[in-house]
Amino acid sequence: MPKINRKSKTIDDFIIDYLEFCSYKNLSIKTIKSYHQTLMLFSQWLNELKEITDIKKVNKEIVEDYLRFTRERGKYTFTCNPEGASIANLDKRENDGKTIAISTLNGYLRNIKSFATYLEENNICKNTKIHSCKFLKTERKAKEQLTDEEYKKLIKSLDLSKFYQFRDFVVINLIFDSGMRLGETLSLNIYNLDIARRTILIPANTTKSKKDRVVFFSSNMSKLLQRWLKYKDAMVETDLLFPAQRTNAVLSIGNFEKNFRVYLKKAKINKKITPHGLRNNFCRRFILAGGNLLVLSKILGHSSVKVTESAYLDLQSEDLRRKYQAYSPLANMDNDRGY
């Protein structure tokens, strides 16, 4: 491929170079797609509204102006091109123009900062001060949790005489018991499973960190997995642990999430719980049972304990609340006032 002179490169050219760099670093397809969408929208805004085509003119003030613009305009009011609007079905979206989530804006800024780091490290731009842009403060909302009774209702809503529901039943229990991500779980094959040691090796090509990771499961889960393996092998011929029955291919995340919503509705659980919420429930129960935060971080595959602390701060607060109740000075003091 012929090289393009740096002086003649457009902002879009630099973005493509950056995406190739991300691919070289073996970042996930999902992450690269996020960078692509964010940066191409930003580039189009620079060109159309600011008439900026020189990457060196992009700085802190410009980025902050873009975030203000996006926040004021709301959802889906600015797209790269008419084709993009058509693909996104903007004419059918009921939340067109409604307030964009602060977490989404912070995601845009995070992606732009990552791009700025690449530009500076490759001496394309200097002193942009983009990294000094501050993230917007968000109001923390505690993640919704399933009670013991709700979880029992959920798994009882599945018909285990049907292949796909028995499969989903095992997946639900495995995520709840091990803390794996849904995508990691669905991509497993039988060789990742060690029944004797009750461990699962999640290969690097399916983990978010792109590193091998080991998770564990209980003796109860071991019995369920053995039961499932016998049933699966009698029904289909594939090394996949949780295949799609008709194609014997990897079951898509979207299809499982669709099934999961049906199970919640059938169980009459009116909470915003997703399959990823099962992972959150695992974390909550691990912490409240006295589990070590460092161990939890390793099991989850987080890059550091700080990531785990940030993600599950509300769960740690609940842990402290429960422990406090056992040591409350007033509750443990004899008094004759009746309170």
Image (tube, grey):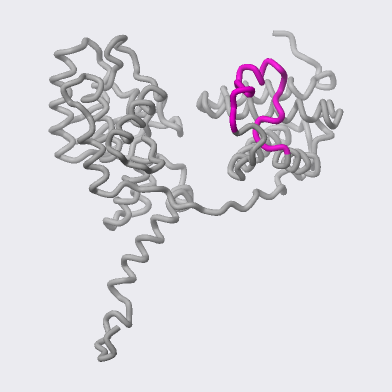
Residue drawn 14% across and 13% down?
Answer: 234
Q: Is residue 15 magenta?
A: no
Please identify the quarter of the rendering in which residue 51 is found: top right
Q: Is residue 92 magenta?
A: yes
Using the image, determine if residue 65 lies above or below residue 243: below
Q: Nearer the viewer, residue 99 or 37?
A: 99
Residue drawn 37% across and 34% down?
Answer: 181
Residue drawn 68% across and 22% down?
Answer: 17
Using the image, determine if residue 333 lies above or below residue 161: below
Residue drawn 43% across and 56% down?
Answer: 314
Please identify the quarter of the rendering in which residue 101 is found: top right
Please identify the quarter of the rendering in which residue 337 is found: bottom left
Q: Position of residue 244 (x, y in %)?
A: 30, 16
Query: Which residues are the magenta region?
Result: 73-94
Q: Nearer the viewer, residue 271 or 252?
A: 271
Q: Position of residue 218 (x, y in %)?
A: 19, 40
The answer to whether residue 67 is left or right of residue 182 is: right
The answer to whether residue 67 is left or right of residue 225 is: right
Q: Position of residue 167 (x, y in %)?
A: 24, 24
Labels in figure, total: 0
Q: The N terminus appears in which quarter of the rendering?
A: top right
The answer to whether residue 113 is left or right of residue 47 is: left
- In the image, farthest residue toward the right: 51
Using the image, determine if residue 209 lies above or below residue 53: below
